[in-house]
Amino acid sequence: MQESVNSLLPVWACLCSLIAVPLIVIFRKEILLREMITFGAAFAKFGFVLAMVPILLDGKVITCSLIEGVSGLNVPILFRVDGLGMVFALVASSLWIVTSLYGVGYMRGLKEHSQTRFFAFFALSLCATLGVAFAGNLLTLYLFYEMLSLATWPLVTHHQDKEARTGGRTYLSYLLGTSIAFAIPALIFTFIKSGGDLSFAGPAILASTDMTAWSSVILLMAFAFGFSKAGMMPFHSWLPGAMVAPTPVSALLHAVAVVKVGVFCVIRVVTQVFDMTTLRQSLGALNVNEVLCWFASFTIIASSLIALTQDNLKRRLAFSTIGQLSYIILGAALLHDVAAQGAALHIAAHAVGKITLFMCAGAIFVATGKKYLSQMVGIGRRMPITMGAFFIGSMSVIGLPPTFGFVSKWHIFLGALSTGQFVFVIVLIASSILNIAYLLPPVWKAFFPSGPTEFDDEGIKEAPWTCVAPLVITSTLCIVLFFFPNELISLTKNLFASK
Amino acid sequence: MIDQIPAIIVLAPLFGAMIIGLFGIRDHRVCLPVVFISLLVSLGASVAAAQQVFNVGTINYFVGGWEKPLGIGIHLKIDALNSLVLVVIGVVVMLVSFFSIRRVGERDTEKTPYFYILYLLLCVGLFGITITSDAFNLFVLIEVSSLTSYALIAMGSNKRGTVAAFNYVIMGTVGASFYLLGVGYLYLKTGSLNMDGIHAILMLETNDANVGASKATTVAFIFILVGIWIKMAFFPLYGWLPNAYTYCPSTSSCILAPLMTKVSVYVMIRVMITVFGLDWVFVELGWSQLVVWLAVIAILAGSMLALAQREIKKMLCYLIVAEVGYMVGGAWLADPDHWGMTGALYHILADAMMTLCLFLFAGIVAKRLGAFEISDLQGLFKKMPITSIGLVIGALAMIGVPPTCGFFSKFYLIRGAIEGGHWEFVAALLISSLVNAVLFFRIFEIAYFGNKPAEGHDHSHDHSDDSIEEGKGSDSTVLGREASWSSLFPLLASAAIIILLGVFNGEVVALIRVTFENSNHLSGLFR
Amino acid sequence: MSEFIQTNVQPYFNFWIYVVLMMIGLWALIAKNNLIKKLIGMSIFQTAIILFYVSLGVKDGSTIPILDHHGPEHHETADAGHDDVHEKEHGKKAEPHHADDHVGPNPDTIANPLPHVLMLTAIVVGVSTLGVALAIGQMIFKEFGTLEENEILEQIKAGNVDD
């Protein structure tokens, strides 16, 4: 067992955006101050997260108990920061800074209404995200998971029009529905089976319990579908529905925070609830060795194919996200250390890449009001920086060097190879090709249109700097991380709780 | 004084009713102080009694000093099982009296004292049902509370309420008669009417190897059960409930909806544990499977019917039908550690508060906005932000979102169901939670989106929202639409209790489970 | 047939009577269209149970339960003066035999008073229920102008109800 350090840092990291919420509401009339509060909270959050990195690199974990035992359950509400959580927290908190900047530009650029509510709930969502990242047991994880579902609803339905209403309805019904139908019973079942110990520390929660093969498999699937933020088919359609949200929301929440919370939970469950060897045995006993892998693979291929047919840029990106999330699930479900490490790295890689793409989509929308790919032919002439960033982001999502996406996909690939599951190797290759097919042609057409376009004579006219700067930063990050991945790699070692 | 607590709980509202009858009819100003004082006395006495129960032990009180052997003395008993129910009744009636302050006064001052007399007599009935330890007195008190509730329902100006009250009279009487008949058979069998006495004699009989042979006992149990099921609106017997609670005056529905069904559930559990004993009910009779399936049907049917409703109160009424299914099912799970029974008892407390909260909400919006249908709630969050808090918390509790008490009651019920092997009940609970989520988020959506649902997109927003939000809109108009504090206080208080009950569920459940530790009615297998 | 009656009906005839009465009442409750007739059914239903209770307290050769310190000769007067109500209600009441001249309450000679006392209460409850029900019926008549259930339902369905 790893040495643990008691520290309040994770609490502060989680709380600082919660504290920001009332401040944002109080200073709703002082727009500048309100936005400074958002930035302050974002930087503070990132600072707190960064402060924990050295401790973790020493091979220790940080624990902090908030409530000793929830009344009646005797399960504490507790934070425990380990490598996996840290990677996620780093990604989420660093990208919040960028998105805040972007959000200010975007919301002002479009003169959106109810900006106070927007920033307040944004901060609240980030609090929940870090709560999930640092959750030290299954109950804490679940609580913050639900908090995130509810806190993001006003963001998704921000426009308050008919479309937002439908999107919001789909969003909540999928997220809450699956969590009530699958996650809660799975949680209670685990609680009873394990005798009330839901902690992620130490051996896997269900390591020393007698579970029939069937109940293990059903429990696994219940968790995987219950945390439907992971977007695995057939519970994926909330994500395209959520694209009615303003772009900063799509960028941070639906490429990073919310969806990654989903896969993060699945990784947590696979690595720390189940015992790897017994899970393998029970899966093998039923001849469903890779049941979760199959679902994930299906999702990867199917969503990539659907993405090809989407003309709305944000929807195309949403389906791409669904596919990429299932990469992460696949990585974890292969039950192999390297693949799981790849999964954890892909949380970061995909986050940085996809947020770039979304911010590009938003920047295009702010500058030109265009939403559809068919309208964007030749737009590279007008917005070269944006489309350049889009290109780099695409490379990272596809997994081409020299971007960080390559590193993570390489790990998953290696893991798949060494488990001998060649089917999944083929899935990975096929989907990468599909990724190229749906991401790169728009870039090509944007820079090299086949005929004259409406953008020809306009010269260079980018979105406001607050929109452009963030996407430059994140696209740079895609490349920088390719050359300096070591810290992240060392954080994600040894994910499985029991060997 | 302290020895007289059990009598005080029941008698305080009774005397209150008499005083109003004597003086209140002439001078209406007498009513409210009398109501508050008498209910406060009852609530205080309930709390004191609960304290004594958990610190010292069961309180037995023989009215007039006529001790048990004589058979017909009035025996009041407060133990772990009913002390919490008493407190909850006290809290609910107290909160509803705040709510009634304006409501009754505004509508028709002529009827005010009569309303309060009935109100206090209803409290007498409810406290009495809970506190009595005598099977026949239970019947009388059930009828006291039922009679007053018929009148309370019919008092409204709504025509349909009158018809509903009439149906309720008939159904209610049939239910009570069945109960009485069952008690008759028990008396025939045992010669006692005291619950403990009946149990002791039944136990003797069981030891005589006369086990289960007694058809009379079974018949008695069936009659009693059917009678109570009618009173609590258990699924196939729920017909009277929705119209009666929908079309009656707000204040009446606020007191009846949270308490009548819940108290009946308590009576069922009391009869199962104290009179017949869980051994007999679960082992000898062995109907657990059957009743849990009935409960499953009740839950599903209640939820589905709730989905089909457009009126707020009617929807809530069908939810009550589903919630009754929770409690009956939970009580019958027959899991070895009694987690199901614990969940049912906890849910009595939780559901009383949840239902109170939501019915208070319905009463407030009906008064303030004239909103009876769900679609009338457009823009509620902006119009009545404080009232909305009550709605949101009540709704989250109904859905079962932690840390509200709704989550924990479901947790205990599901735990009991899993340990008792009743997976169908788990499924029913989850489906019902889902339906509740759909129902309430439909309301949230309407309440949140305001009254411009189909307005253009992205750019075409007018900035009326902002003007309110940024404080340029006059605050007075916003607050002017908010309900008065006498209505808001009980709403917010019930919302707060919902959360407190959830946060301190462990402590509450520990108290509930005292029943299972000390009771000598749980022998053998269920010890 | 006669054997069936001898073994199953005769010894339990009080049960049979109450069941038959109860069913009559229940039938009226369900099948009758007029609200007042429903109430009559309800009363029959309640009365059936009251009779059942009363029959519980009866046994052959027993008399009314009154503590008597002056010997058996006073029984007659006590009976006539005091237990008038019971006499009417029961319909069937064991005639006061004086099998033995026992002084004081001998359990064998007196009818069980408890069910009868209970039924006094139950009768009161029943009367009040009927009173409330009739009052509500009156309100219905004022509001709808009819007591026939189908007509009331039609009015409700037609939306002829102003809240």
Image (tube, rainbow, N blue to C red):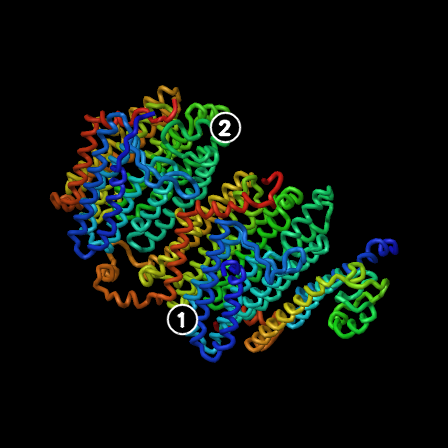
Q: Which residue corresponds to mark 1?
A: B102
Cα gap from disc 1 to disc 2, whole angstroms: 61 Å
Check whether the beta carbons of the residues at disc 1 and disc 2 lie within 8 A of each other: no
Determine if marks 1 and 2 fall on one subunit: no
Q: Amino acid at mark 1?
A: Arg
Residue lying furthest right = C2
Instruction: Describe the element under mark 2 as helix, strand or loop.
Output: loop
Quarter in which the C terminus of chain B is drawn: top right
Residue at the spot 61% in from the left edge and 52% down from the top edge: B271
Residue A320 in the figure: left or right of residue B195: left
Q: Which residue corresponds to mark 2?
A: A210
| Image: A278 above or below A181 | above
Location of residue A91 by image quarter: top left
Residue A122 in the figure: left or right of residue B291: left
| Subunit of label 2 | A
Q: Is residue A413 visible?
A: yes
Residue A193 placement (x, y as % from top left) = 48, 33
Residue at the spot 61% in from the left edge and 60% down from the top edge: B65
Number of numbered discs present?
2
Residue at the spot 62% in from the left edge and 69% down from the top edge: C129
* Viewer-nearest residue: A345 or B519: B519
Instruction: Describe the element under mark 1 as helix, strand or loop.
Output: helix
Q: Amino acid at mark 2?
A: Asp
Using a 10 Å C-alpha cutoff, classify the residue at mark 1 as few (fewer than 14 neighbours), some (14 to 19) or many (20 or more): few
Location of residue A476 by image quarter: top left
| Image: C157 above or below A370 | below
Using a 10 Å C-alpha cutoff, classify the residue at mark 2 as few (fewer than 14 neighbours), some (14 to 19) or many (20 or more): few
* Viewer-nearest residue: C84 or A76: C84
